[in-house]
Amino acid sequence: MTEIQSSSPNFLAQPLGASATGNGPMSMEKAKAAAEQFEAFFLSQFLNSMSSGLEADETFGGGESEKLFKSMLNEEYAKSMSRQNGIGIADAVLREMLAMQEVER
């Protein structure tokens, strides 16, 4: 039987304008980190979908281990792309987060 791998993001949803402690608006550093994590998660899902139809290379033998490795490799590629300004999703998300904090005040 095939195992279903959880693909939940590594960030937690918080009410807009609230910090983790609930003492006020989110700091710029935390907002930027959350936006980058969101972009990395999106890119990881995109890369996994893009490579899902590819056949395993005969050199490495394929199998479940290669599928798991490919998923982890795509996640690391996505994190790296996001850290290096990615494709612009993090910037758009950060702008919206900051705009929502201004509305909430």
Image (cartoon, rainbow, N blue to C red):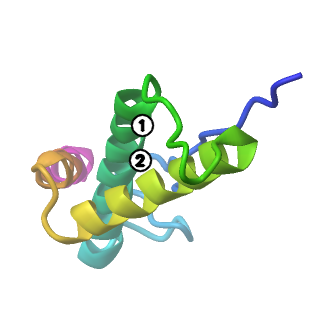
Question: Residue at point 34% right, 56% down?
Answer: 78
Q: Position of residue 68 (x, y in %)?
A: 65, 48
Is 103 colored magenta in this rendering?
yes
Task: Please state which of residues 38 and 75 is positioned toward the viewer in this rendering.
Answer: 75
Q: Mark 2: which secondary structure?
A: helix
Q: Which residues are magenta?
A: 98-105
Task: Give the residue furthest to the right.
Answer: 1
Cα distance between the residues tagged 1 and 2: 6 Å
Q: Label 1 belongs to which residue?
A: 45
- Asked whether residue 83 appears in the rendered view, the answer is yes
Q: Picture quarter containing residue 2?
A: top right
Look at the picture and state if 66 lies above or below 28. above
Front disc: 1 or 2: 1
Structural crowding at the residue carrying mark 1, measured as other residues with C-alpha within 10 Å and reported as few (<14), some (14–19) or many (≥20) = some
Question: Residue at point 34% right, 30% down?
Answer: 50
Query: Do the residues under discs 1 and 2 have CB atoms within 8 angstroms?
Result: yes
The amino acid on which the numbered mark 2 sits, given as a three-letter code, is Phe
Label for residue 27? none
Q: Is residue 7 left or right of residue 96?
A: right
Q: Is residue 59 left or right of residue 83?
A: right
Q: Position of residue 63 (x, y in %)?
A: 71, 40
Question: Residue at point 35% right, 54% down?
Answer: 40
Task: Give the residue furthest to the front.
Answer: 59
Label for residue 41? 2
Q: Picture quarter containing residue 17?
A: bottom left
The amino acid on which the numbered mark 1 sits, given as a three-letter code, is Gln
Question: Residue at point 12% right, 54% down?
Answer: 91
Is 49 colored magenta in this rendering?
no
Quadrant that contains the N terminus: top right
Q: Position of residue 24 (x, y in %)?
A: 40, 67
